[in-house]
Image (cartoon, grey):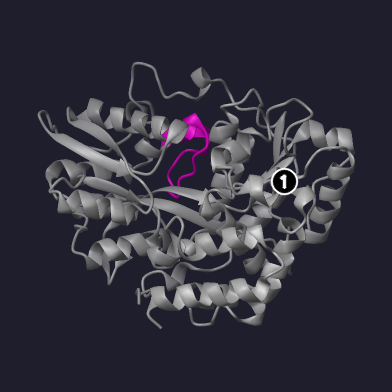
Amino acid sequence: MRSTSNTSRTRRTVRAAAALVAGALALSLTACGSDDDKSSGGESSPGEESGSSLTLPKLDGTTLSVAAVWTGAEQANFKKVLAEFEKRTGAKVTFVPAQDPIVNFLGSKIAGGQPPDVAMLPQPGAIQQAVEKKWAKPLGAEAKAELAKNYSQGWQDIGAVDGTQYGVYYKAANKSLIWYNAQVFENAGASEPKTWDELLTTAQTVYDSGVTPFSIPGADGWPLTDWFENVYLSQAGPEKYDQLAKHEIKWTDPSVTEALTTLAQIWGKKDYVAGGAGGALQTEFTEAVTQTFTGGDQPKAAMVYEGDFVQVNIGQTKAEVGTDAKVFPFPKVGDTAPVVSGGDAAVILKDSEGAQALATFLASPDAAEIQAKLGGYLSPNKNVDLSAYPNDVQRTIAEALIEAGDDFRFDMSDQAPQSFGGTPGKGEWKDLQDFLKNPTDVAGIQKKLESDAAAAYGN
């Protein structure tokens, strides 16, 4: 069973963050700037522009590789960060596209004698596994100093195992947002909901106007786990959330029954889901976003649930955030609106001066501000200048994350052993896909979830 001793202290509700996000997202959002506006381009480096004191070694002749599961615009934007590191140090850095589950991908690379120097791991459970397999190397003094200067203790803790620091959480996510097509809402006379019941009313209003309410990326299991986590956190509360995350209570618990039954109010109404269950199960995340913001006022769906990073995919359409694409916090199902956070950590697999320097750079505001300007990115680094974010919604979400400090709940599936919470076609991902296909079988899915969890956690 995976140890949770280094993450338990950080899994608290983001009450301060929820208040900040809810208040600011009720306002109209300014549109994203153009690609030129967002770029960190120019002749001087971001570090020089901000008067950075970060010192990196000269690494002429050094070659490094960085593996991550990022694709599309997210990958392209991260490559600009790596390009700045190359400019400052003289090193050459290659991006290695990885596949989920990344631990399996890395295992094959290591077995073949070609591990990447650094891997971006999207789950605390994956960091734990990398340490247990003796792949991960501890951070050096410079990287730890940069981390301590720029991160709250909570974000440091979730990158540590048994008191040793291995991970730099370079990227965070607020995974409690629902994005909507503003023209569809206006045409339907729909309003932003604050509660689950209001969300159901809004969905019916949109449906009555002739547009399918929701786009759900069922082909990817992870967004389905995020749907569940938001409902569960708000409905069952933070203590139950923590217990289920550590498998201290079973997936057959009545609190899970209630959450799945609530989810079925949307998932089980085929006219509310673009393409019905069958279509949703063939829809990948990127398509789920873009089909919500293409087609003018007759898109395939009016709303899509996912985190702040959705802006990257909206940017691939003609829609502008704040004008055509707007957002509201995931409505509260219970007493409080949920705020679930996720993140990706840089972990060194081949210890060297170059790899340590890259980890140090990724722990700095210099690196984060490059990607912040490009949109669709959120940093847990408390010293990132909020003006680096390209629009009001992103600045608000970033400020909320920093104001919350250590008071947040991390994505539940990312805390689980990867075989349960992070593997396509297996565990929670597959079970919730099956539930999307047949939302009437709550008890059957609970039994399957519990069986898979027990096998993964070893209890």
Is 229 included in the stretch rendered in magenta?
no
Amino acid at dot 1: Phe
Q: Looking at this view, is 417 or 20 the one in front?
A: 417
Q: Which residue is drawn at 79% across and 54% down?
A: 199
Instruction: Using the image, determine if residue 403 lies above or below residue 47.
Output: below
User: Is residue 23 left or right of 1 when viewed as pictured?
Assistant: right
Furthest residue toward left = 61
| Neighbours of disc 1 within 10 Å: few (<14), some (14-19), many (20+) | many
Q: Which residue is drawn at 70% across and 74% down?
A: 258
Q: In which quarter of the image is residue 234?
A: bottom right
Q: Position of residue 77 (x, y in %)?
A: 41, 31
Q: Looking at this view, is 29 or 419 the one in front?
A: 419
Q: Looking at this view, is 151 or 39 the one in front?
A: 39
User: Is residue 439 left or right of 456 when viewed as pictured?
Assistant: right
User: Is residue 6 left or right of 327 when viewed as pictured?
Assistant: left
Instruction: Using the image, determine if residue 178 lies above or below residue 325.
Output: below
Q: Which residue is drawn at 69% across and 45% down?
A: 24
Q: Tell me, yes or no, if residue 51 can be seen here.
A: no
Q: Position of residue 14 (x, y in %)?
A: 59, 62
Query: Tag count in the figure?
Result: 1
Which region shows up in magenta?
Answer: 369-389
Q: Position of residue 137 (x, y in %)?
A: 19, 57
User: Is residue 376 left or right of 207 when viewed as pictured?
Assistant: left
Q: Name the residue under label 1.
A: 214
Can you say which quadrant of the picture contains the C terminus? Answer: bottom left
Q: Residue at x 30, y 55 (%)?
A: 104
Q: Tell me, yes or no, if residue 307 can be seen here.
A: yes
Is 385 included in the stretch rendered in magenta?
yes
Q: Position of residue 396 (x, y in %)?
A: 61, 43
Instruction: Using the image, determine if residue 76 lies above or below residue 154.
Output: above
Dot 1 falls on a residue whose secondary structure is strand
Can you say which quadrant of the picture contains the N terminus? Answer: bottom left
